[in-house]
Amino acid sequence: MLIAAIEAGGTKFVLGLLENDPKGGAPSILRKARIATGEPASTIDAAASWFRQSFSEIGRASALGVASFGPLAGRFGQPSWGRIGPTPKPGWAGFDLSGALMERLGMEASMDTDVNAAALAEGLWGASRGLSDHVYVTVGTGIGGGVVSNGVLLHGAGHPETGHVPVPREPGDEYPGRCPFHRCCLEGMASGPAVAERWGAPAETLAPDHPAWDLEARYLASGFLPLVHVLATERIVLGGGLGSAPGLAELIRTHLSRRLAGYAPRLDAPGAMDAFIVPPGLGGDAGLLGAAALAIGAT
């Protein structure tokens, strides 16, 4: 079974043609490409052209999965699902992504948010394998979280928006916040662009002992509190370009422990916090493999 998969991001689309593993393992990536995310029509045209070429050379996929940047409008499973919700990305708000792919490729897309798809893949084949309650958080250009609760992806009236929870401003931090909607939310205070704007330099250029990292960890620890208290999740998989920065996870664990103040005894045992916040097991392929999992109905 060949699977077409798209990880649709705000800066790039990752396209893949994969082969399903009949024994239940992770699909094999036969071919992969990246294209820049431009305006919607040209981006979808470029993606469709790549898939048509790949189909002609390897074989036509029997299913299509899409892991998309959010927010996604409407309710999961309803006809409106598949449209992009309010976003500052020019031209994308209200765009019918699944409909455009159907028009170009003649394939109905199984679609969810990029972080929900990554959470699904990490639970099936990665760092959260064997757990029924876990979260995948990406920290990069934006911040988002995908939630698996009681073994299934979490959907409500919309989808989880873990990056837009309000966080208390840290003492002495006068940065107003990057989010155009909420300012002082987790994404507004701790995303990659927020770090670069606050400190005047991209995060990847900052020294390991720069005070930016401790401040980043403090905000992320505050943003993770609802995942501990409200979702009672068993694990947080921390991904994304900024989330994977060396030493950041250790700082988050320290500050999260202080904020919990002993109220979550399950995380007080020796080594418990080290097993609670972990790196992705699937590396940079979690989103693409999650899209494939959506396509084969592994939800």
Image: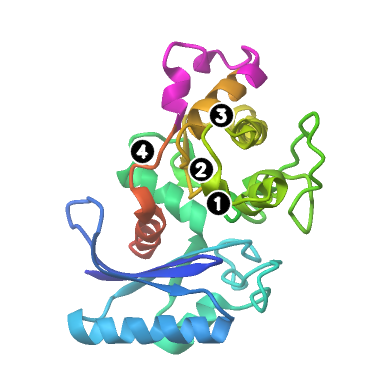
**Mark 1 and mark 3: span between their CA atoms?**
16 Å
Residue 88's place in the image compared with 299, above or below, is below
State which tag comes first along the sequence, 1 or 3: 1
> Circles 1 and 4: CB distance less than 8 Å?
no
Mark before the other along the chain sequence, 1 or 4: 4
- The local secondary structure at tag 4 comes to loop
x, y percentage for residue 268? 52, 12
Q: Amino acid at mark 4?
A: Ala
Q: Residue at x 74, y 54 (%)?
A: 179
- Write the residue at 57% across / 81% down: 40
For this rendering, which residue is in front, 252 or 292?
252
Magenta segment range? 258-277
Q: Which mark is residue 127?
A: 4
Q: Earlier in the sequence, mark 3 or mark 2?
A: 2
Mark 3 or mark 4, which is nearer the start of the sequence? 4
CA gap between label 3 and label 2 equals 10 Å
- Is 208 placed left or right of 190 in the picture? left
Using the rendered image of the protein, determine whether residue 146 is visible from the camera's viewpoint: no
Q: Is residue 281 left or right of residue 26?
A: right
Give the number of the disc on residue 140. 1
Say which of 13 and 65 sits in front.
Answer: 13
**Is residue 127 rendered to the left or right of residue 140?**
left
- Residue at the location (33% across, 81% down)? 51
Query: Which mark, by number, is residue 252?
Result: 3
x, y (%) of residue 185? 74, 45
